[in-house]
């Protein structure tokens, strides 16, 4: 996973990240444990120090979850982006998800 660099001008605590993103603190810690969100550096006192990159990535994960993507699908999408895949390849992965959702909707209508 690509590390997220921090700017001294934009660092904040997990509580502030939670407030800004609307994601529960325990969920943020969970996403770190499973690798969806890179572990942030820590202050000398051991507090997590997040930056704008963490906030953007967390917003992406949150939105993907709202759209019904599974954790594994989100991990796949993030891997495509980090791996240097093209927008078209990322689009294909999203379209595969859409096809799956449409199939589930069709099953519910039966």
Image (cartoon, rainbow, N blue to C red):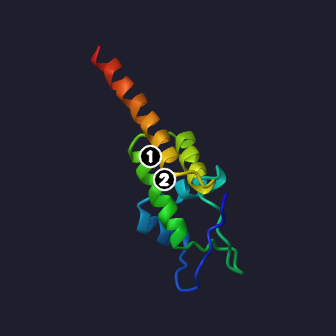
In the figure, is residue 34 to the left or right of 90?
right
Number of marks drawn: 2
**Residue beneath label 1, please?**
65
- The answer to whether marks 1 and 2 mark residues whose Cβ atoms lie closer than 8 Å is yes
Residue 75 percent coordinates (x, y): 58, 46
In the figure, is residue 18 to the left or right of 39?
left
Q: Is residue 52 above or below residue 83?
A: below
Give the crowd class for mark 1: few <14, some 14-19, many >=20 residues within 10 Å: some
**Residue beneath label 2, please?**
61
Secondary structure of the residue carrying tag 2 is: helix
Q: Is residue 16 above or below residue 101?
A: below
The residue at 47%/40% (across/down) is: 92
Label 1 to label 2: alpha-carbon separation:
6 Å
The residue at 45%/45% (across/down) is: 91
92 and 100: which is toward the camera: 92
Say which quadrant the N terminus sits in.
bottom right
């Amino acid at each position: 996973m690509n590390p997220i660099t921090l700017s001294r001008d934009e660092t904040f605590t997990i509580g502030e990240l939670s407030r800004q993103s609307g994601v529960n603190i325990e969920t943020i810690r969970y996403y770190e444990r499973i690798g969806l969100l890179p572990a942030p550096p820590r202050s000398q006192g051991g507090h997590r120090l997040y930056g704008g990159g963490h906030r953007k990535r967390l917003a992406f994960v949150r939105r993907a979850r709202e759209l019904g993507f599974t954790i594994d699908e989100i991990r796949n999408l993030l891997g495509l982006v980090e791996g240097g895949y093209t927008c078209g390849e990322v689009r294909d992965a999203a379209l595969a998800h859409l096809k799956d959702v449409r199939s589930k909707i069709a099953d519910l209508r039966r």
